[in-house]
Amino acid sequence: MTEKEIDSKAEKLTAVKGMNDILPPDSARWEWLEDQVRSLMGRYAYRNIRTPIVEPTALFVRGTGETTDIVEKEMYSFADKLNGEELTLRPENTPGVVRAAIQHNLTYDGGKRLYYMGPMFRHERPQRGRYRQFYQLGAEALGFAGPEVDAELMLLVHELFAAFGLRNVRVELNSLGVAAERRAHRSALIAYFEQHLELLDADSQRRLHMNPLRILDTKNPAMQALVQQAPQLLDYLGPDSLQHFDTVKTLLSACGVNWSVNPRLVRGLDYYSHTVFEFVTDELGAQGTLCGGGRYDGLFALLGGKPTPAVGWGMGLERVLELIKQQGETPAAPVPNAYAVIPDAVALPRAMQAVQTLRGAGVSVQMHAAVTAGADSMKTQFKKADASGAAYALVFGSDELAENAVTVKALREGGAAQRRESLSDIVKWASTLQSRT
Ligand code: ATP
Ligand code: MG
């Protein structure tokens, strides 16, 4: 087959359903957000951790929980073609972080405060705010038992949202107490639902004896009245758990975070304890949970480590960016400082050299390409310069180069028309290109 024949037969490939390309200029919003995150994490003394995207499937079966939606139906799992090992693309990163902490004995000399950012994978029905590859930012504080760290972590989310310029985000809190308290509540819950079996949907009947707490989480409108009346875990908490919860609330209020208690906020897994929380908006429809987290004091032991208290949260970045966009806080798209206009291929070596020196001095320069393939007219090049958003055009014409100089032309309104600068002392005038005209 000739190259042409191959071309005409090749089928176009597209991205996997529910997995998105993030393209410029949109990607600049992501970079802006990531910059804000790194800066704030640094100020809270949280350090970056990067764990693999692929982990043993068993990590999530144990660490996320066999009875969760994630493990029951959302994981991308496969057998390694070479050795048959059961592997999974991470659907969340807390189990990976805890695995790494155990494997490297991270908490041997005290607590560790960590954060991560990266793609997660869940096989869900794609819709706005719900994708099959999505990005999560997460923070985990390992080895701290006190309620002040629960509050610190929530404060961190609060401050992040402030840095993003977000408004109208609610903070909902609950406490799951400790295992014995949950057991007592669980019995009461099962007894209650057993009295109303005919009102339970199929999913909930299946969960009744496996994971009744999850029923409280149901989104089925027909069951709302039933779960509203169900026994509340808060009523089963002893004095220590209540004190932990009260301290969290007091500290949040002291730091200016408005919260409300949502007694139906649960995590249906036994390694969760004490504080659980969500940051929620009403402005994104059904996908309004921006961030969810809680204390998971039992997870280290479940994954084979020494019992270690821990607390953390995960945040969906697509949802956060969508809300930022919707609330009109989009950062300006980046533009180069200058655009190099190169009328003739002969000018290329010296033009590229000069542009390189400018970049070295911190100036962002976009070079006109396609010179060698037949020079574009000055008119075309200036049109491109204008469209690039640059404040200045740098003209490397033959007259200029004969004098070892370049013409600097202001492109934006109100700028001084143009001037000549010498190529022998570029660093002296480079910084003048960094201010708008
Ligand atoms: P939901 O109830 O919306 O399915 P979840 O309880 O599964 O959320 P977590 O496992 O707590 O979510 O993940 C933390 C955050 O990650 C969520 O609050 C949400 O912002 C985001 N998130 C979860 N699943 C997706 C997804 N499929 N696409 C985009 N973001 C997601
Ligand atoms: Mg989910």
Image (cartoon, rainbow, N blue to C red):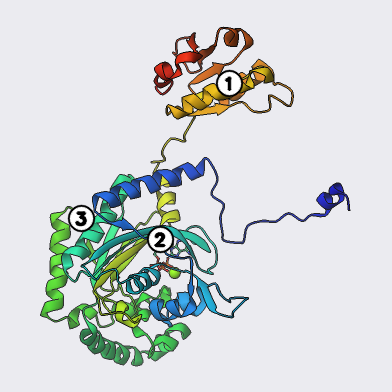
Q: Residues within 10 Å of mark 1 (few under 14, many from 20)?
A: many
Q: Which residue is mark 3?
A: 257
Q: In the rendered image, which residue does mark 2 sit on?
A: 50
x and y, in percent, of residue 415 in the image = 45, 13
Tell me if 368 is positioned left or right of 361 in this view. Answer: right
In what element is the residue under mark 3? loop
The image quadrant of residue 383 is: top right
**Would residue 339 be visible to someone looking at this image?**
no
Which mark lies nearer to you, 1 or 2? Answer: 1
Ligand 2 picture quarter: bottom left
Residue at screen point 31% across, 79% down? 305
The residue type indicated by label 1 comes to: Ala
Earlier in the chain: of badge 1 and badge 2, it is 2
Q: Residues within 10 Å of mark 2 (few under 14, many from 20)?
A: some
SS at mark 1?
helix
Amino acid at the residue labelled 3:
Val
User: Could you say which is closer to the camera, residue 363 or residue 270?
Assistant: 363
Q: Residue at x 40, y 16 (%)?
A: 428
Q: Position of residue 88 (x, y in %)?
A: 51, 73
Give the amino acid at mark 2. Arg
The residue pinned by badge 1 equals 351
Q: Is residue 269 above or below residue 43?
A: below
Ligand 1 neighbours mark 1 (CB distance < 8 Å): no
